[in-house]
Amino acid sequence: MLPQLNGKSYPKEVCLNGIWQKPEEAKISVFDRGFMLGDSLYEVIPFYDGKVFALKEHLSRLKYCLQEISLDFDVEMLIPYIEDSVRRSDNAGKDAAVYLQVSRGAAPRSHFFPERSEPIFLLYSFPVNLSGFENKHWKLLISEDIRWHRCDIKTTSYLANTMLNDKSYKLGLNETLLVKEGMITEGSHSTAFFVKDKIIFTHPEGHQILSGITRKIVLDLCQNLGLEIREEAFPFSEIENADEVFLTGTTTQIMAISEIQFQDNILFQAVESGPITRKLQEAFIQKTRNP
Ligand code: PDD
């Protein structure tokens, strides 16, 4: 059994290319392009009370990303493995998530995509507490968005994201909010929303952000609740004037923000979650727990 680290444990089993095995026995080639070049994609899929949520949306994003990197892989064949990964774990019937990765596979190292390679897939489930998020608040740090120009591709090449996230972690904060050319793009692993004068703002889809599945769910909820939403980037200079800020993501769900720091200044502070954030959180709980 592999040891825990930072309060996180390894799964008891992983599925590598359809074979369930102990993680310490699962092996990939040192020439795997995911390992060598970051030539691989991933998804994190939530399970509420043991039931998968938004599977179709996660798989269609994976399909889009596969197309963008010219990798031929049948996404549909993953479905039984995804379902199985929770069923056969200690997480059955509980809140959990599945980590899923598809790599182009092994080939002699080259900068161009090899003519032939056997893609490999890895997946496993892990426990995650998806209840009570509506009672939590996160504190954020602002940093320059140093990532590449295709943030819509959910690649495992998350070095920039982890460098950025580590900055807030080291300060005891929860997430890093990214700014590019004076505008907020998103978080290092989450989508950002701002509320000003009852209007909700979030960065438009495109190459600068990941098309978050939770983002899309929140956009739909806004429409159902009659809330005004604009897919427009929010300026860094306006953060001081924001009424509410929240982040979204598969495991983040809808997280209220209580503080935003930039260098040594506090740009935004809120003692409690705002009314729009709370309304969306309630609707989100309804949707995820009673789909
Ligand atoms: N992160 N933006 C970035 C850069 C992300 O990495 C994520 C998700 C999101 C939110 O997307 P979604 O709502 O589809 O989860 C936005 C995942 C969960 C992770 O890295 O673990």
Image (spheres, rainbow, N blue to C red):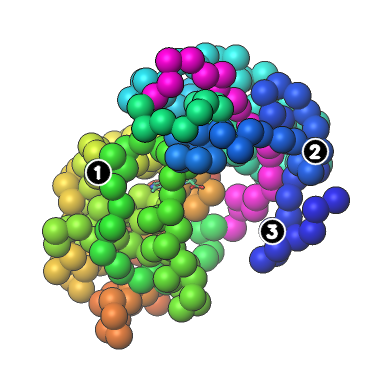
Q: Which of the numbered marks, if any, corresponds to residue 149?
A: 1
Characterize the local packing of mark 2: few (<14), some (14-19) or many (20 or more) Cα atoms within 10 angstroms.
few
Q: Is residue 242 left or right of residue 96?
A: left
Classify mark 3: helix, strand or loop. loop
Q: Which residues are magenta?
A: 113-132
Could you tell me what secondary structure mostly forms the magenta stretch? loop
Disc 3 target residue: 8
> Which residue is more in the foreground, 231 or 99?
99
Residue 12 picture quarter:
top right
Q: Is residue 47 left or right of residue 164?
A: right
- Residue 131 painted magenta: yes
Residue 288 placement: quadrant: top right
Residue 7 vertical position relative to residue 217 in the rendered view, above or below? below
The quarter of the picture showing ligand 1: top left
Residue occupying the point 32% across, 37% down? 152
Tell me where residue 222 appears, x and y as whole percent. Answer: 31, 41
Compared with 187, 231 (above or below) is: above
**Of residues 284 and 97, the one drawn nearer to the viewer in this rendering:** 97
Which percent across, then down, holds residue 97?
62, 41
Local crowd size for mark 1, using a 10 Å CA cut-off: few (<14), some (14–19), many (≥20): few
In this rendering, position of residue 223 left or right of residue 94: left
Location of residue 102 in the rendering, given as x and y in whole percent from the top left corner: 54, 29
Tag 1 secondary structure: loop
